[in-house]
Image (cartoon, rainbow, N blue to C red):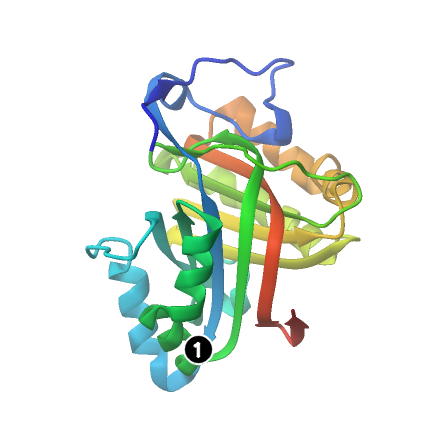
Amino acid sequence: MTAGRAISKTPAEGMPPDGLAQSEQTRSRVIHTVDGTVVLLLSRLRPMHWPWGWHRTALGSWLPQRTPGLKFIKSLGSGIGGGFGLTPSPSHQAMFCVFDSEYSASDFIAHSALIDRYRQRSEELFIATLRAASVRGSWDGIALAPTATLPADAPVATLTRASIRASAAAAFWRHAPAAQRDLSSAEGCELATGMGEAPLLRQATFSLWQNTAAMDAYARTGAHLDAIRAAWKHQFFSESMFVRFVPLRLQGQWKGRVYD
């Protein structure tokens, strides 16, 4: 982890690039930048293992971590069906990890007891290994260092997450459903799922696209554009992060599709 740095850049044109607002609080706080490889896990648990999954979601990010190379971890829930609604899913959950190297990330996927437990307990399990190509914002004061180059015609993965101000929650959720419906049917979107660190107020979206053009066509038009303009204008978020990733490896199965 590098020394902290302050974020002070103000977005131009009244709206930040890629549509994510950064509050004055976020721009002035000290941000620690992490250089590493990301592992994103999506799980649909068998019903008999739902209690185990709830325990993971509630406590997984807080328990002491002794995994070699692990720099950052978040255990996340999801909406019904792995979607974006307000009703929590008893079966769907996610995990976001940052490791110090691709080797550490691969070793974690191949040999960790936690991943083995997910494999044994899941009806579907998807794991993506990713490197950040562009980053705006932070997550709990942690930013990712962009270390990869994203080819124009190659697949791209994105993560959007935000801490929503309690006073703005109702307004945020008025805009969210239409944007998420558009995402689910967007041309070139191969996978999209909603994730939550806490109900209502700490939300995230992961998506996988055929290429950058397809992702930009969704992000800069329609309901999503309306939502991000509203978020920036009315300062919905106390902290937010948007990342474009180069997928290094996709493996497992999600919504019937087999990867790798």
Indicate the quadrant containing the N terminus: top left, top right, bottom left or bottom right.
top left
Residue 61: % across, % down: 28, 54
Q: Note whether residue 87 is visible.
A: no
Q: Relative to 185, say whether 223 is above or below.
A: above
In the image, taking residue 152 as reference, residue 53 lies left or right, namely left
Residue drawn at (64%, 46%) of the image:
179
Number of marks: 1
Quadrant of the rendered structure where residue 108 is? bottom left
Pick out the residue farthest to the bottom.
48
Q: Note whether residue 141 is visible.
A: yes
Residue 173: % across, % down: 51, 45
Nearest the eye: 98 or 233: 98
Residue 168: % across, % down: 43, 35
Indicate the quadrant containing the C terminus: top left, top right, bottom left or bottom right.
bottom right
Say few, some or many: other residues with alpha carbon within 10 Å of mark 1 (under 14 / 14 to 19 / 20 or more): some
Pick out the residue farthest to the front.
103
What kind of element bears circle 1? helix
Residue 87: % across, % down: 44, 63
Query: Could you tell me the amino acid type at mark 1?
Result: Arg
- Read off the residue under disc 1: 119
Residue drawn at (30%, 54%) of the image:
68
Q: Relative to 120, say whether 199 is above or below.
A: above
Nearest the eye: 37 or 177: 37
Residue drawn at (24%, 55%) of the image:
65
Quadrant of the rendered structure where residue 225 is? top right
